[in-house]
Amino acid sequence: MSTFSKQVANAVRTNRAEVKRLALKANLLKHPEVKSAFEMLPPKVRKDATLAMSVFSNSVFINLHVFDLDSFKDKRFTNLLERFIDWETTTADYTYSLPNKDVRFDKRCYDDKVGDFTISVQIMAYVKPDSPLCRIVTTGFTEEVVRKEVKQIVCA
């Protein structure tokens, strides 16, 4: 067998193993833990949620955008947060055009066929642009000086 033929056979074996692994991962979307997490969302917002699977890791994502809040104390938002209170939580605030807060809840799970996997529920909340209760204000300024090396290749 030529070197090329060996390389082709190796690539085919690797690709078949990857296809099998991805098929097993796709079953995570139907896992009872994922279904349970999705059903933790109130029935009337489930139609707005999206379900996705990471190509690079054993992670399932449930994403939900919530728009037109009066503030981040709006019951539509806080009621969602309370449902995942026991999960590992991270938040991020954004001050671009609208007050925006992303809250991510992570739960680690296990499946006999795939092993460890994570369910991530991300709720992205946006306050109304004309809300009197929540707005973006400038509180100060930061100044940055960036010094970068300039390099080139010099050959003799």
Image (cartoon, rainbow, N blue to C red):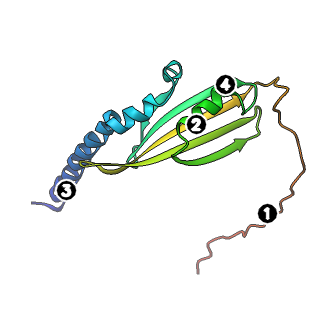
Q: Residues within 10 Å of mark 4 (few under 14, many from 20)?
A: some
Residue 123 visible to the viewer: no
Q: Which residue is mark 4?
A: 67
Label 3, label 1: how far apart the Cα atoms are: 47 Å
Label 1, label 4: how far apart the Cα atoms are: 37 Å
Mark before the other along the chain sequence, 3 or 1? 3
User: Considering depth in this image, is 126 or 21 the residue closer to the camera?
Assistant: 126
Quadrant, the N terminus = bottom left
Task: Name the front one of labels 2 and 4.
Answer: 2
- Residue found at x 70% / y 28%: 74
Residue 10 bears which disc, if any? 3
Residue 116 point in image, percent of width and height: 34, 52
Q: Which residue is mark 2?
A: 82
Tag 2: amino acid:
Glu
Specify whether 4 is left or right of 106. left
Q: Secondary structure at mark 4?
A: strand
Mark before the other along the chain sequence, 1 or 2? 2
Q: Which residue is mark 1?
A: 146
Q: Secondary structure at mark 2?
A: helix
Label 3, label 4: how far apart the Cα atoms are: 50 Å
